[in-house]
Image (tube, helix red, strand yellow):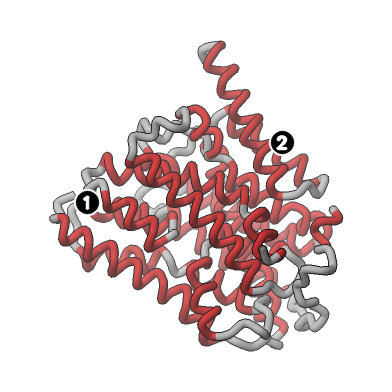
Amino acid sequence: MNKLLKKGLIDALPIFFGYLSVGFAFGIYALKSGFPIWSPILMSLTHLSGTGQFALVKVANTGSGIFEICIAVSVLNIRYILMALAISQRLSPSISIWQRLMIAMADTDEIIAVALKSRTLVTFSYMMGLFLSSYAGWNLGTLLSALGGTLLPQCVINALGIALYAMFIAIIIPDAKRHRPMLYCISIAAILNIILKFLPTDVRPNASWSILIAGIVAAVIISAIYPERASTSLEEQSDIVPQKENKQ
Amino acid sequence: MNLTATQVLYAVLLTALITYLLRAVPLLLLRKQLTNPFLVALFKYMPFALLSAMIFPDIFNSTADITIDPATKNDTTIPLISAIMGFIVALILSLKDKKLPTVAAAACSVAFIVERISTLLNF
């Protein structure tokens, strides 16, 4: 097997387990809301999007129609545009258009975050490795919930709920430790989001909006203060030279 | 929920298409390296800022029992002792530059053990 594909499959193991838990939670939520049993499975197969899928069910629960559902999902998933723009700057020049169209399927917060952690340009094989692990976890989790979720004990599913958050911490903390502006950036974003979360309910934006507002404001402030020259030193990801992150 | 099965099918497929377009269009439009220093910095900091906002404060109730009410997974603000311990472990290991699977597995294990203990002690 292609070494970079394999590396992607392995690097995405935390996503696999995290998605197993969230995918399971999603399935339970959709079924409890009265959705037909095939629908959460189809959603997970075609969306691979936590916010989008939860939003679809949530908005449908309020009695809204298809139009409102589409608006809600579009607005909440604006974040994927930002993530796609960020990863576009790290894709190897050898990646073709149709490969870009496949990489687009892998545009989730978790997959992009792991891909950005590699200090190199990323290849198509690596992105597909990350995608396949994550996609398997997400759909397996949803399938388990549809089957009644008896294969994994509930206490295990609950504990897995922290997997993605722990992974995010492992992504942002090492950078913040070495790079002062990054520390300021993640601190501002965290504090802003906490403030937004504790606003009185009548003025509080919903969770996805808070994250978007907090993230954009923090990134704009820090980029204005600490602009950067384009880095020309990114190496091509290679299956011969060991990756820097492996040396840690 | 008062959609028919057919309407659910349309809603799922339409939103899937929208989601895919949101992901694919930027990747097709932006195919070269940016040079504007503000934008270079912005695309570097943006994912980390978003991740940070996703972590805090939601991590503190990430181990909540989703079968009771899965909708509360993102909405409640009650911190759980298992999630707090898991967070502390993840933070310490990340400061020591441990790899992602290690940090995630350690946080899950600690959350699991703490949850078991607190159930036994009947918190």
Residue A155 percent coordinates (x, y): 50, 27
Does residue B10 appear in this view? yes
Report the residue marked by disc 1: A62
Q: Which residue is mark 2?
A: B89
Give whichever of A134, A70 is nearer the camera: A134
Direction from residue A81 to residue A116 in the image, left or right: right
Query: What is the spatial separation of the Cα atoms under label 1 and label 2, in whole angstroms?
Result: 39 Å
Which residue shows up at 53% across the image and 39% down it? A161
Q: Looking at the rendering, which quadrant does residue B44 occupy?
A: bottom right
Observer-nearest of A174 and B27: B27
Contact (CB < 8 A) between labels 1 and 2? no
Q: Residue furthest top?
A: B121
**Position of B103 relative to A82 (above/below):** above
Kindly identify the residue that appears in the image at 56 percent across and 44 percent down. A17
Task: Please rate how many residues cluster around mark 2, counting C-alpha atoms within 10 Å: few if below 14, some from 14 to 19, many from 20.
Answer: many
Chain at tag 2: B
In percent of width and height, residue B104 lies at 65, 43
Image quadrant where residue B68 sits: top left
Q: Is residue A225 left or right of residue A125?
A: right
- Mark 1 residue type: Thr
Q: Do circles 1 and 2 both sit on a common chain?
A: no
Q: Is residue A89 left or right of residue A240?
A: left
Q: Is residue A73 above or below residue A62?
A: below
Q: Is residue B75 visible?
A: no
Three-letter amino acid code at the position of disc 2: Val
- Residue B52 locus on image (x, y percent): 62, 55
Which of the two residues, B16 or A179, is positioned nearer the viewer here? B16
| Helix, strand or loop under label 2 | helix
